Image (spheres, rainbow, N blue to C red):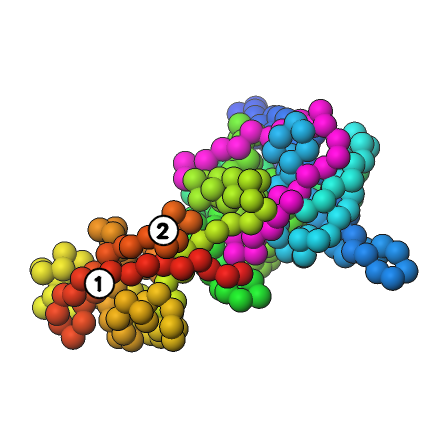
Amino acid sequence: MSRVAEPPTPAETEALDAYSRAVMAVADRLAPSVASLRVMRRTRGGQMPAGAGSAVVLTPDGFLLTNAHVVGRSDLRGRATFGDGREERFEVVGRDPLSDLALLRSEGDGLVPAELGDAEQLRVGQLVVAIGNPNGLGGSVTAGVVSALGRSLPARSRRAGRIIDNVIQTDAALNPGNSGGALADSRGRVVGINTAIAGIGLGLAVPINEATQRVIGGLMSDGRVRRAYLGIAGGPRPVPPQARAATGSTTSVEVVEVVDGGPADRAGIRPEDLILSVNDTRIERVEDLQRIMVADLIGTTVSVRVLRAGRLIELELRPAELET
């Protein structure tokens, strides 16, 4: 004889109600700030659908943030539809495939901007809410927790590849059309831009942090993101035990390949060199190199400390601009 499930206790009911209230509060706050996108491309016969997704309002005068893969190319236009039925045309201001972010500008004003948070403050297990607007019909809301931090996501442009680091993994389900939508904390602050489904019940979001803010600023001012470029391919490599005391490092980036005629080649960097630091910034992972390759380094002289066949060598290098 099967047992009848016992009704929840008052304490359990109160906990569920508190969880529901938190999710509903986030949804109510962010729903006006998340738009549905219909991306169009021009053809000889007129305009054809080229994609769909969601976007987050950044400013009252029409700047929207979404994924680069949602808009595809920077010459596309489309329409943004909000939860209240309002529809505005938009154009792509700029896109950065290497961070999977794109900036749009809609023709309307008086929009409700979302508050941006800081993904660096997130903790595993923290409540997050994924909000998208795949059909322009009031949006899609799912809730879950941060299941992992510090994930990596490969990204490519036509000429370059890069790793998006500190990606947020969540078990808040991402529905079709949610790419470009908001991942928010329990206070309704946007801490990530939903970008990919990582598997059954797992989603990934590009974090909103200092690096992302620089990308947004570059797209807003220049329509693109400028990055410095060394001209190497490499991977993590432990520093030999006998050299750890002298170098002060246990991990480095080993140079696997040097691009002919590139900045590293001209500076004398060779395959099998172990890069320990750049401008006194310790380098332990490829992501450490990526993080410091900002526009300010383009054309300036930087010092690179390498370990070559057990010897410490200081080299000077002038990074070039990465062509994407």
Residue 28 in sight here? no
The quadrant where residue 209 appears: top left
- Could you classify mark 2 by the number of other residues whose Cα lies within 10 Å: few (under 14), some (14-19), or many (20 or more)? some
**Left or right, 34 with reference to 258:** right
**Part of the protein shown in magenta:** 93-122
The disc label shown at residue 297, or none = 2
> In the current view of this chain or complex, which residue is farthest to the right?
45
Q: Position of residue 2 (x, y in %)?
A: 65, 47
Measure the C-alpha gap from mark 1 to mark 2. 15 Å
In the displayed structure, would residue 111 be above or below residue 80? above
Please tell me the numbered disc located at residue 91: none
Mark 1, other Cα within 10 Å: few <14 / some 14–19 / many ≥20: some
Q: Position of residue 180 (x, y in %)?
A: 63, 46
Depth order, front residue of 269/57: 269
Residue 104 visible from this viewpoint: yes
Up/down of 139 relative to 289, above or below: above
**SS under mark 1:** strand
Based on the picture, tell me whether residue 105 belongs to the magenta stretch. Answer: yes
Residue wearing tag 1: 315
- Work out whether residue 299 or residue 125 is closer to the camera in this orientation and state it: 299
User: How many marks overall?
Assistant: 2
**Type of residue at label 2?**
Leu
Q: Amino acid at mark 1?
A: Leu
Task: Return the x and y of residue 322 as percentages of the image width and height.
Answer: 46, 60
* Image position of 289 with respect to 89: above or below: below
In the picture, residue 320 is in which quadrant? Answer: bottom left
Q: Earlier in the sequence, mark 1 or mark 2?
A: 2
Residue 1 among magenta residues: no
Query: x, y (%) of residue 138?
Result: 76, 35
Q: Give left or right: position of 287 versus 196.
A: left
Q: Image point 59% across, 54% down: which residue?
A: 196
Residue drawn 49% across the image and 39% down it: 213
